Image (spheres, grey):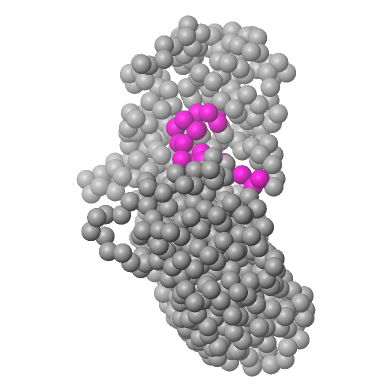
Amino acid sequence: MAEVPSLMSLCMKKVGKDILRDDLGNDLSSAIYELPSDLFDGLLMYLPPLALQKLQEEMPLRCWNGHESTNICFRNGRKRGSCGNFNTAWKALFKSRWPDLARKIQRVDWSAGVAKYESIIDWQQMYWETHLQNCIDEAAEIAVLPSFDGCLGEIEIPDTIIKCIGYKGHRSHSTCDYSKLSYHCEQFGSYARCLKLQNMLCLAETSHLLRKSRLQQLVLRWIKSTEHMDGLCQLLQQNNETLSSLEFIFCNLSSASLNAICDSLRVKDMQTYRVQHFSITNTVLERNPVSLPHGLVSFLSSGRSLCSLKFSDNRLGKNFAKLVFNTLLDASSRLSTLNLADNNITGWLFNFNQRSSTWPLPSFGLGKSLQLLRVLNLRGNNLCKDDADNLKYALIYMPNLEILDLSDNHIEDDGISSLIPYFVEASERHSPLADLSLGDCDLSCNGVTQLLDVLSTLKNPLHSLSIAHNELGSQAAGPLGKFLRTVIRVLNVEDIGLGSSGFLKLQEDMPEEVKLVSINISKNRGRLETANFLLKLMSKAPELVVVNAAYNFMPVESLTVVHSSLKVGKGKLERLDLRGNAQFCQSAHAPLFDEFQHRGRPIVILPPLPAADEPYDDDP
């Protein structure tokens, strides 16, 4: 039976509706500001978004002393409160309309504290930005139709969206036409900081519709035609002083397009660029140009704010990668992340060793951009052992490198042997290298054994290592057991063929204390020995937080061993993934682990009940 609303709640809702009436709204708002604080604060929680917006915008300065506000900001010269009880009301409205997105936004860094994190979120800004994005997405679905030939601003927004903000009357009775996209851009465009636009919305009209916006992040999809490029460049010029992040996905960008984009990003009076993060993914570019577009060269050379550069999954060839890298060597940016993943750049550093034939680091000046590089992602680039040999010389120009991803490249044991001298030299120089990914690199047990032996003796040991998807076999268990004696915190050994004998060997060689916080042992067909390994690991690794033991062919009797391992654990475990073990099922075995919770959620992730005819296999 539905709960009967109280007289107070009915009155509050009626007031909220009356605030929006043209004939009553202003007089009523003035009276509301004189309410006692408890009634005023209670009213805020009942107001629909439009009424709350109006009340907050028009609140006199003298009234802010009587009602909570801890952070008052100014937009377009008008005072608006963004925290205190108004912010609480906006947060409630956001959570009610977009509960999943709200949970995502509120993933808190608990070391910083919840209160500190909450205080920096402007829920009013988040609400109207997300609302405007919804309106833009609806408009895109209409504008993409071949039959559409009108103005973007005249596109009607569905009633389902309009009702969410509190307008339920007849449009003809209002001086504002809430149904048009132009209204929502006019009223809420100033709240937009981050928007996603598809190609059909990249027109000159869009720049006019979003003229009040000061965009900081812009994501663009399917930009291909000259018309779209012209509209986009106008929007970029309009926001080039505030835009810090620009991302292109599924676009077709010629050299002329790249020149136009980079020219639009330049702040004219200062002849510089404000963009910090530049990304092009899944996009058609010229694969092997003789030279880079002059606009892109200028952007890479003079973009002193540039921190992150991504050319990923664009099928780029070695010439493009080589030209980008050589341009960065002499650039003046403060680049910290370079992502060239999922291209085809075999040979991009050919003969680079002739440029750096000695080990001492270059003086500050040459390669000044890469001196601050922290992350280098070369995953999935069809690199071979010769590329690894040349890479070790290029890495000299990156003395502050922390994360190196070479996964999904055919560098083999010889490639690892070429890189080992760099790892040793970097450690001697107290390099911060902490995260190394070598998954699916065609490594053998001999190559990995050599690598682990060296990594175990480094002065600055690794924090994270991945050797997943290499066919190592059970013989790798011995070297891995010794490696666990280091201070390694994150280890990924997914699908390396450990088998039952490998897990048994790991148990025998496990040290008295293991520093791991996360380990992935999935897809190793360990059967019952997987559970026995977990039992011993839990007792030796007091800081362990995440374990992935999925797809290990574990029999049902493993569950009691896993239960025992959780009992002997030190209580920090947040997630144990047991999916893909076909003899487990959530409905039958979940009650066994009900007592193990983290922040109200189950720690143990079990597979759902399999279909009756589903084959029993550990291959996902």
Which quadrant does the N terminus fall into?
top left
Question: In the image, residue 433 lies at what x, y percent?
Answer: 68, 72
Q: Main secondary structure of the magenta part?
A: helix
Magenta residues (range): 90-110
- Residue drawn at x 63%, y 50% as measured from the top left: 571
Q: Is residue 395 visible?
A: no
Of residues 155 and 528, which is closer to you in this image?
528
- Residue 601's place in the image compared with 47, above or below, is below
Q: Is residue 428 visible?
A: yes
Residue 68, picture quadrant: top right
Question: Residue 579 appears in which quarter of the rendering?
Answer: bottom left
Residue 536 covered by magenta stretch: no
Which residue is depicted at the point 65% across and 17% down? 60
Q: Tell me where residue 200 appears, x and y as whole percent.
A: 35, 50
Residue 54 image offset from top left, x and y in percent:
53, 21
Above or below: residue 273 compared with residue 205: below
Q: Residue at x 53, y 28 (%)?
A: 92
Which x, y percent locates residue 155? Answer: 33, 37
Residue at image location 27% in from the left, 64% down from the top: 615
Residue situated in front as seen by the camera: 363 or 479: 479
The answer to whether residue 512 is left or right of residue 502 is right
Q: Is residue 367 above or below residue 150?
A: below
- Is 236 positioned to the left or the right of 69 in the image? left
